[in-house]
Image: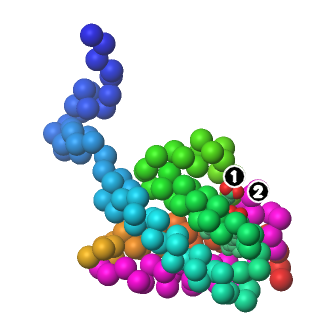
Amino acid sequence: MDIPLTPRNAVPSATHAASQATPQTTLYDVVGEDFFRTLVHRFYSRVKDDDLIGPMYPADDWEGAEDRLRWFLVQYWGGPHTFQQRRGRPMLRRRHMPFSIGEAEAQRWLELMGSALDQFSDEELAPAYRAQLVEHMTRVAYMMINSNS
Ligand code: HEM
C-alpha cells in the first residue's frame, strides 16, 4: 500500500508533528449548515428593505440570491463545494461589476451583515468566529468597490 508522504509522516519535530496530527477542523464543521442558512436569510431580509442596496438585488429571485451567497460562504469556510459546482469559480469582483458599488454601498452591506450576525448569541457563535467572519467579509466588501459614487 502506498503511504502518501505528508508532513505528518515527515515528523520534523515533536511540536510540528502534534500540530499536524489531528485533521483540520473548519469553521463550517463547528457552526454547521444551519448557521449559514439562518445568517444569510436574516441578512437578505434586511437587504430587501434597504433603500441603498436593496434595489440592486433581483426582486423576483430572493431565494436564488440566498442560495448563491450561502453556497459561497459555506464553501469558503470549509463546507461542501456547491458554489463551485453550480456557479463555477467565484470571481466575485467580476460578478459584482454590473452593480455600482462605492464605499457607502460596501459599508451598508457590512452594517446589515453585522446586525444579522448580532442576532446570534455568544453560545451560538463564539466571538472569535464572529470576528473571523467579519474580517473576511470586510476584506471582500472593500474589494468589490468599483465606483466613486
Ligand atoms: C460591497 C457591497 C456589496 C454589494 C452592494 C453586493 C451586491 C450584490 C448583488 C446585487 C448581487 C446579485 C444578487 C444575486 O442575484 O445573487 C450579489 C451577489 C453575490 N454577492 Fe455580493 N455584494 C456586496 C458584497 C459582497 C460580499 C462582501 C460578499 C462575500 C463575502 C458577496 C458575495 C456575493 C455572492 C457569492 C454573490 C452571488 C454571485 C453569483 O453566484 O452570481 N457580496 N452581490
Asked whether the residues under the numbered discs 1 and 2 touch, taking CB atoms below 8 Å apart as contact, a structural biologist would say yes
The one nearer the camera, 91 or 112, is 112
* Image quarter for ligand 1: bottom right
Instruction: Give residue 51's position: percent from left, percent from top.
Output: 73, 89
In the rendered structure, find residue 94 and report the number of the disc placed on it: 2
Does 39 appear above or below 103? above
* Segment tinted magenta in the rendering: 93-122
Q: Which residue is mark 1?
A: 91
Which amino acid does the dot numbered 1 rest on?
Answer: Met
Residue drawn 30% across the image and 50% down it: 25
Q: Is residue 84 left or right of residue 58?
A: left
Label 2, secondary structure: give it.
helix
Q: Is residue 76 visible?
A: no
Q: Residue furthest bottom?
A: 51
* 102 is higher (above) or lower (below) than 72: below
**Horizontal placement of 62 versus 97: left or right?**
left
Q: Is residue 20 magenta?
A: no
For the stretch drawn in magenta, the main secondary structure is helix
The stretch drawn in magenta includes residue 98: yes
Q: Residue extending furthest front?
A: 60
Which quarter shows the N terminus? Answer: top left
Give the residue drawn at x 76%, y 56%. Answer: 94
- The spot of residue 148 in percent (x, y) is 83, 79
The image shows residue 20 at horizontal and vertical percentages of 26, 40
Q: Which mark is residue 31?
A: none
Quarter of the image with the C terminus is bottom right
